[in-house]
Image: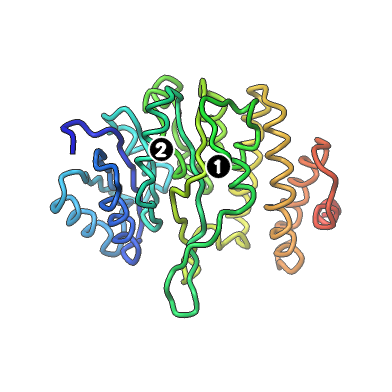
Amino acid sequence: MSTRPAVTVIVPGFDVANYAEEALDSLLAQSLPDWTAVLVDDASTDATGDMFEAAAKADARFRVVHHDRRRGLGAGRNSGIDLVETPFVGFLDADDRMTPHALERLVGTVAASGSDFAVGAYVRLRPDALGAYVPGVVQPWVAAATDPARTGTTIDAHPEASANIVAWSKVSRIDLWRRTGLRFPVGKLYEDQVVAQQLYTRARAFDVIPDVVVEWRERADGSSITQHKDALPVLHDYLEAMAGGVGVLDAAGHPAAASARVRLILAMDVPPLVRIAHTHPDDGYRRALGAFVRALNARGDAEPTEQVAAALLW
C-alpha cells in the first residue's frame, strides 16, 4: 500500500451488526489497496460500533466516528466527508458489499480521464429460500446509465445517467464536493437522489463504466428503508427526493436529463406506489401520490400508463 491513500470510502451504519462484517470484508478484498475508510457509527444500539472499533484496531486504514445520537444516513456521510484528506471519495452503506475490483475501476477511470467523478453499475442482493443473499442482474435502467463505457461525458450528452441516483455507485474528486459546497440533506430518507443530480449538473465531466461496483442488500427481515414505502412519512420523503432531483436538473438547464428522469419515475417508481395506494388505509397516501403524479404528468414527458391514469384521479 502506498503511504498516501488514493480514496476515502465513507461507511455509515446504524444497527447493522448482522451485515457490517461483509461490508468491511469487501473493502479488505479490494484489488486496489490504496484506500482508507471512515466508519461512521450512527449511535447504534447493537454491536455495530464495537465491530467498527475492532476493524480499526486490526487495520489502520479504518477510522471510526461515533455519533452521540442518531442523526441519519445523510449526517453520517457528511461526518465522513469532513474528514477526507485523499484526492477521491466514495461511499458504501454498511449493509452492502463492494465488488472486488470496484475501487480499482472507479478510481483508475476518473484518475486517468481527469473527470470529476466516475459512476458504475449495481445489482440487488436479495435473500433466497435458504437465507443466503444472492446478487441479481443489472436492471435495464442501470445499464442504460452505465453501459457502454463513456469518458469525459456530460449530463447533456448522456441524459440517461440521471437514472443512477445512489451515492455508493460513484467515486468522485473531493475537490468537486469542496468547491461546490455539496452536502447530503440531514433528516431525510432517500437523501442521495438530490445530491446525485447535483453531482451531474456541477461536474465539468464524468465517466461511466458498466462494471458492477456494489451489491445493494434488500434485507430479509424487511428493515431496509426501501421496503417501507407503505409508510406515509417514508412516501413523503421519497416523493420529495424524486421531485427535488428533477428540480435540480430543471434549474440547472438540463431538459433532456430532466425528461429522462421523469419518464423513468413514471414507468418504474410510480406503479408500485399505485399498487400500495389502492389498499392503503390512509387517504392521505393517495392524495400525496396523486398530487405528485399530476405534477409530473403535466410536464408532458411521457404518455400516461394505466397506473399513472389511476393516480391522476386521486
Residue found 54% across the figure and 36% down from its top: 149
Left or right of 53 on screen, residue 167: right
Of residue 21 and residue 70, the one placed in the foreground of this image is: 21
- For badge 1, the amino acid type reads Ile
| Count of numbered badges drawn on the protein | 2
Q: Is 208 positioned to the left or the right of 175 in the image?
A: right
Label 2 sits on residue: 106
Q: What's the mark number on residue 165?
A: 1
Along the viewing direction, whichever of 216 and 29 lies nearer the viewer? 29
- Tag 2: residue type? Leu
Question: In the figure, 197 relative to 135: above or below?
Answer: above
Quadrant housing residue 175: top left
Identify whether 284 is placed above or below 249.
below
In the figure, 188 relative to 162: above or below? Answer: below
Nearer to us: label 1 or label 2 = 2
Name the outermost residue toward the front: 148
Residue 249 is situated, as x and y percent measured from the top left of the image, at 64, 29
Residue 262 is situated, as x and y percent measured from the top left of the image, at 72, 40
User: How crowded is the residue under tag 1: few (<14 C-alpha within 10 Å), some, or many (20+)?
Assistant: many
Quadrant assignment for the C terminus = bottom right
- N-terminal of the pair, mark 1 or mark 2, is 2
Colour scheme used in the picture? rainbow
Q: Closest to the observer: 194 or 72?
A: 194
Secondary element type, mark 2: helix
| Nearer to the camera, 311 or 84 | 84
Residue 261 screen position, x and y as percent? 68, 39
Q: Find the distance from the CA under tag 1 to the CA under tag 2.
A: 16 Å
**Residue lying at 39% horizontally and 45% vertically, measured from the top left:** 102
Looking at the rendered structure, the secondary structure element under dot 1 is loop
